[in-house]
Image (tube, rainbow, N blue to C red):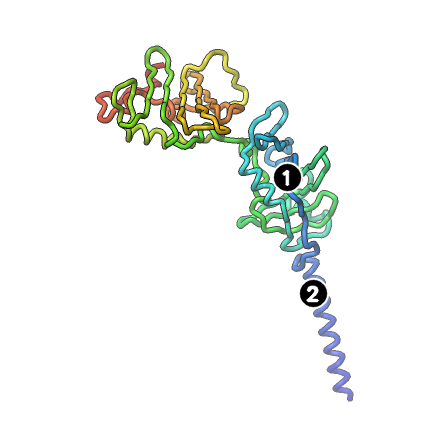
């Protein structure tokens, strides 16, 4: 009888120790106490307010418009990169925790979730109604990031690469397109340059011509493919042109359309010594800075670049300045 009682006491003690251990582990983050942190119908989102820590929490405001997302910071208003905003919203559609890692404010700094260390994102609906808000802190390799709700103490670890990437500077979110078109839809290329160096390329049934003479079609196609997608984050927000552009490229074609109507793609360049400032009809709210040997040189070509085995391949627009 004594042995049975002793064994029962040992069993009860071990069971109690097991329960206590499980409770301690739960407090250390082995269990999830929320099934969801954020759950939102992204179709209801009309505005996004982002305060990135990397930008000293300067507010970036995104607004949904008929033409896509537009961003604003201070006096700057520009087109946003719609794909990145769509990814942001998709990442916030359903934020689920992997584990609870802290339950008090004492651990906020460890996970970079104090007001001064965190990035804040707020989603707004119609009439500015707040739909949700989230503080985003320390991000680790592999997409794990620590978050908390502004009105709660708990810190959660989540596996969400999009949320982990919210702490980005302004230019990351801007539309960085200078050119974006389908090269095979272009039938005419006009280069307007200073003095008498302008010329025009045209496509007909026989191929490409340059000012009426035969051009090398393979060189023209290679050029169009090279410039069909040109992007840059070298924005020149303070540039104000004080003259007409010195260089202009116009691309046109029956199939080069916008909203169902033939619409030319135009790039203008303003000469500033060793640099040029570029803007285009693709992204009219942006001005880009380029070295004369950089993106500018890729777009604004001399005649000799379209003549096979041209005797003078040293022509350049930089020399013509």
Could you tell whether 270 is left or right of 170 in the image? left
Q: Nearer the viewer, residue 151 or 137?
A: 151
Q: Mark 2 or mark 1: which comes first in sequence?
A: 2
Towards the viewer: 221 or 187: 187
Element at label 2: helix
Residue 49 to residue 293: above or below: below
Dot 1, how many residues are within 10 Å of its Cα: few (below 14), some (14-19), or many (20+)?
Answer: many
The residue under the point 69% across, 39% down is 115
- Residue 127's place in the image compared with 164, above or below, is above
Q: Quadrant of residue 130?
A: top right
Tell me the residue at 73%/78% (across/down): 10
Q: Secondary structure at mark 1?
A: strand
Q: CA distance from mark 2 to mark 1?
A: 33 Å
Is disc 2 in contact with disc 1, using a CB cutoff of under 8 Å? no
Q: How many marks?
A: 2
> What residue sits right under mark 1 in the picture?
119
Q: Residue at x 70, y 62 (%)?
A: 24
Residue 234 visible in rendering: no
Residue annotated with mark 2: 22
Which one is nearer the viewer's eye here, 233 or 57?
A: 233
> In the orientation shown, which residue stands out farthest toward the bottom?
1
The part of the image, by quadrant, that contains residue 7 is bottom right
| Residue 131 percent coordinates (x, y) | 70, 41
Tell me, yes or no, if residue 144 can be seen here. yes
Residue under the point 47% across and 23% down: 280
Image-based side of 24 in relation to 172, left or right: right
> Residue 292, image x and y in percent?
39, 22
């Amino acid at each position: 009888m004594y042995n049975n009682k002793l064994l029962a006491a040992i069993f009860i003690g071990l069971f109690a120790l097991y329960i206590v251990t499980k409770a301690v582990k739960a407090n250390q983050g082995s269990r999830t106490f929320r099934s969801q942190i954020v759950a939102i119908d992204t179709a209801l989102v009309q505005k996004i307010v982002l305060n990135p820590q990397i930008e000293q929490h300067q507010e970036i405001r995104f607004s949904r418009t008929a033409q896509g997302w537009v961003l604003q910071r201070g006096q700057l208003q520009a087109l946003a990169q719609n794909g990145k905003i769509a990814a942001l919203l998709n990442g916030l559609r359903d934020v689920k925790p992997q584990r609870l890692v802290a339950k008090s404010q004492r651990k906020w700094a460890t996970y970079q979730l104090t007001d001064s260390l965190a990035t804040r994102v707020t989603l707004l609906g119609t009439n500015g109604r707040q739909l949700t808000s989230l503080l985003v802190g320390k991000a680790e390799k592999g997409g794990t990031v620590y978050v908390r709700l502004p009105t709660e103490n708990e810190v959660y670890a989540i596996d969400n690469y999009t949320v982990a990437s919210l702490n980005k500077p302004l230019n990351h979110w801007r539309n960085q397109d200078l050119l974006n078109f389908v090269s095979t839809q272009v039938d005419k290329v006009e280069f307007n340059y200073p003095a008498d160096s302008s010329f025009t390329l045209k496509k007909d049934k026989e191929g490409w011509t340059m000012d009426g003479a035969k051009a090398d079609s393979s060189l023209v196609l290679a050029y169009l493919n090279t410039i069909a997608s040109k992007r840059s984050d070298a924005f020149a927000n303070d540039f104000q042109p004080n003259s007409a552009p010195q260089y202009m490229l116009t691309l046109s074609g029956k199939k080069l359309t916008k909203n169902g109507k033939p619409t030319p793609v135009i790039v203008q360049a303003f000469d500033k010594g060793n640099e040029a400032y570029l803007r285009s009809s693709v992204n009219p709210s942006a001005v880009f800075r380029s070295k004369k040997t950089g993106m500018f040189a890729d777009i604004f070509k001399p005649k000799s670049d379209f003549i096979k085995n041209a005797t003078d391949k040293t022509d350049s627009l930089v020399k013509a300045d």
